[in-house]
Image (cartoon, rainbow, N blue to C red):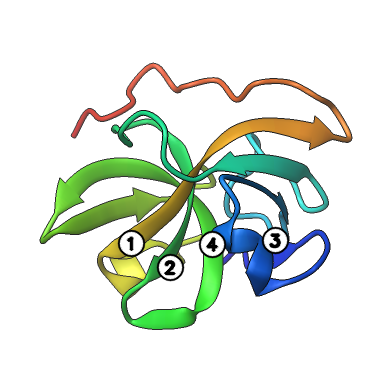
Amino acid sequence: MIPLRPYSAGEALLRWPLFPVLVRGPSMAPTLRHGDMLLVRRGGRPVRPGDVVVARFRSRPDLLVVKRVRRAQDGGWWLIGDNGLVVDDSRAYGVADVLGRVVCRYWPHPGRLSRPADAGDE
């Protein structure tokens, strides 16, 4: 699981249209690594398969995670991690509710996140 901690003021940041998050854990490697800082947008264009998002699993509402969207399911989203060796995504916790879409990584290697070639494929 990649629990996320807001970079500063805490849960209040989640109410802003853009908010920072800090990645913890290996489940999104190699795309994201422990210690990466991300800028996340609430709203904007709709979420679609292949997007990297910040979400809460309905079965674990106390935990913020960053995962890749696989598909819409049961009024929420089925999310997976990029690291196939770590199974702490929708396969373990079920459907999630997306809080925002990752716009870019701003530390330590600034840049946009790429979409995998199989984004959204089953």
* Residue 85 visible, this orientation: no
**Do the CB atoms of the residues marked 4 and 1 lie less than 8 Å apart?**
no
Amino acid at circle 3: Gly
Q: Residue type at mark 1: give it.
A: Asp
- The residue carrying pointer 3 sits among few (fewer than 14), some (14 to 19) or many (20 or more) residues within 10 Å by Cα, namely some
Please name the amino acid that badge 2 sits on: Arg
Numbered disc 2: secondary structure = strand
Give the image location of residue 4, x and y in percent: 66, 64
SS of the residue at dot 4? Answer: strand
SS at mark 1? strand
Residues under labels 2 and 4: Cα distance?
Answer: 6 Å
Marking on residue 56: 2
Q: Do the numbered discs 2 and 3 sit on residues whose CB atoms are within 8 Å? A: no
x and y, in percent, of residue 78 in the image: 26, 53
Residue carrying label 4: 65
Tag 1–tag 2 contact (CB < 8 Å): yes
- Rate crowding at label 1 as few (under 14), some (14 to 19) or many (20 or more) other CA atoms within 10 Å: some
Q: Which residue is mark 1?
A: 97
User: Amino acid type of disc 4?
Assistant: Val
Q: Where is mark 3, residue-wise?
A: 25
Q: Earlier in the sequence, mark 2 or mark 4?
A: 2
> Which of marks 4 and 3 precedes in the sequence?
3
Cα–Cα span, label 3 and label 4? 10 Å
